[in-house]
Amino acid sequence: MPTPQKEETVSDVAETLRNAQAAILADYRGLTVSQMSDLRKKLRDADTQFAVVKNTLFKRASEGVIDPNPQLDETLNGPTAIAFAMKDPVATAKVLADYIRDNRNTPLTLKGGVVGGRFFTADEVNALSKVAPREVLIAQMLGSLQSPLTSFVGTLNGIVSNFVFTLQAIADQKQAQADS
């Protein structure tokens, strides 16, 4: 029979899952308290909540929020910490991957995650961390949309300019004929 504390944990995790863009799972076994605090601070800057949740409680909380997935069930073994990306999954994945890369002796390892309701393996989460930030992608998209319009306006401007120069040349020619 579940205790009220476990029920509250399950409801809190379920609510966080509903509001999060992604949940990235990591094995934190062996991290010191200072390393865990450092990682939490970096994740907080990326608008990410980092929590250690029992696997069974996470499975119960994910029911009805995340589609059942056998890969997710396999991933949920051993100690698991979950990074809940509240805004940008790429930023969260980048913080975790950078932390692992910068601290070569860290025992932290990625296990996988759920992004947009789809299960990602550890390799896919690593690939996600290499994607450009959201703002850069938006700027690139706007630039690619704006480029053809700018070229079209330049072409129209050239046509109008050539027409004006032609009219001016005809006017100058007629003026020269009238003066002679």
Image (cartoon, rainbow, N blue to C red):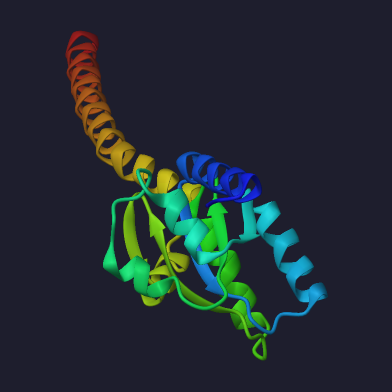
Q: Nearer the viewer, residue 23 or 61?
A: 61
Quadrant in which the C terminus appears = top left
Q: Where is residue 88 in the image (x, y as percent from the top left)?
A: 51, 49
Residue at 35%, 50% in the rendered image: 66
Q: Nearer the viewer, residue 78 or 141?
A: 78
Q: Which of 126 and 144 is in front in this view?
A: 126
In the visual, does 42 lie left or right of 172? right
Q: Where is residue 19 in the image (x, y as percent from the top left)?
A: 50, 39
Q: Nearer the viewer, residue 16 or 87?
A: 16
Q: Above or below — where is 144 with respect to 53? A: above
Query: Which quarter of the picture shows residue 153?
Result: top left
Q: Above or below — where is 158 with respect to 65? A: above
Q: Where is residue 169 in the image (x, y as percent from the top left)?
A: 21, 23
Q: Position of residue 43 (x, y in %)?
A: 66, 59
Residue at 56%, 62% in the rendered image: 82
Residue at 35%, 43% in the rendered image: 64
In the visual, does 69 lie left or right of 79? left
Residue at the farthest bottom position: 105
In the visual, does 46 lie left or right of 172? right
Q: Above or below — where is 22 with respect to 146? A: below
Residue at the farthest right position: 34
Disc tally is 0
Residue at the farthest front position: 1
